[in-house]
Amino acid sequence: MGASTDGAESLHPDIEQVLIGSAHIQARLREIAAEIDRDYAGRQVLLVGVLKGAFILMADLARSLTVPVEFDFMAVSSYGSATQTSGVVRILKDLDLDIAGRDVLVVEDIVDSGLTLNYLLRNLRARGPSSLEVMALLSKPDQTRVDLPIRYQGFAVPNVFVVGYGLDYAERYRNLSFVGTLRPEVYAQT
Ligand code: IMP
């Protein structure tokens, strides 16, 4: 993880620190896309994005892929507007497609406790895909609480709450092109 800055990104008034700069994210996504292209050569991948956090990641990753891809999305409940996990996972939006016999790659923004992904993988596995793998942009150290098969991993982040690049605090900051931490005053205001 590098505290790279790409110019204007440090200017957002609510951001305390940029943890992963936008150029760094894009470079890592291109590396991961090249790996996916190799691993899935000759096959068709069904990307399953976990909403809402993965929408930006999914769009950028997919544009670097050359293997044929299809898209589907799921929405599950996570933190709401607090910053602590509840451990309760609910499907808010299910897949449109039948994944039986498909090569499925789940695209997830961040794995913290791993509870969300753990639930999701069990649920998807029961539908009989021919393969099921995970790409997660970020992971936090707590993830060791559950043993998760994350095939493609972007960056490890420390155990702090991060926003940007799809990740929100109270539904804001998803559109930032980098990953960073918020100033403490921002939490005090909500
Ligand atoms: P887990 O079930 O504890 O692994 O939590 C995963 C979900 O919680 C992610 O998909 C995010 O939606 C949310 N989450 C976890 N950590 C953060 C964070 O630092 N910032 C924003 N959302 C987070």
Image (spheres, rainbow, N blue to C red):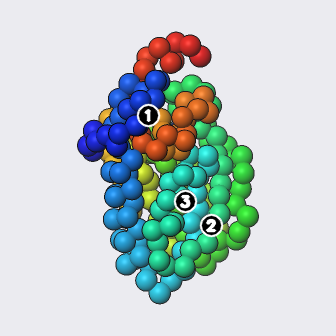
Mark 3 lies within 8 Å of ligand 1 (Cβ measured): no
Disc 1 to disc 3, C-alpha distance: 20 Å
Q: Position of residue 38 (x, y in %)?
A: 37, 78
Residue 65 image offset from top left, x and y in percent: 46, 72
**Mark 3 lies on residue:** 59
Spatial CA distance of label 1 from label 2 is: 26 Å
Q: Residue at x 54, y 79 (%)?
A: 68
| Badge nearest the viewer, 1 or 3 | 3
Q: Is residue 2 left or right of residue 65?
A: left
Residue tagged by mark 1?
Answer: 162
Q: At numbered mark 2, what does the secondary structure look like: helix, strand or loop?
A: strand
* Extreme residue in the left direction: 2
Image quadrant where residue 95 sits: bottom right
Q: Quadrant of the N terminus?
A: top left
* Residue type, label 2: Phe
Helix, strand or loop at label 3? It is helix
> At label 1, which amino acid type do we have?
Val
Measured as percent of width and height from the top left, residue 98 is found at: 70, 71
- In which image quadrant can residue 184 be found? top left
Please report contact status of discs 3 and 2: CB closer than 8 Å, yes or no.
no
Task: Rate crowding at label 3 as few (under 14), some (14 to 19) or many (20 or more) other CA atoms within 10 Å.
Answer: few
Q: Residue at 62% of width from left, 67% of height from top?
A: 71
Q: Is mark 1 within 8 Å of ligand 1?
A: yes
x, y (%) of residue 114? 46, 44
Q: Residues within 10 Å of mark 1 (few under 14, many from 20)?
A: many
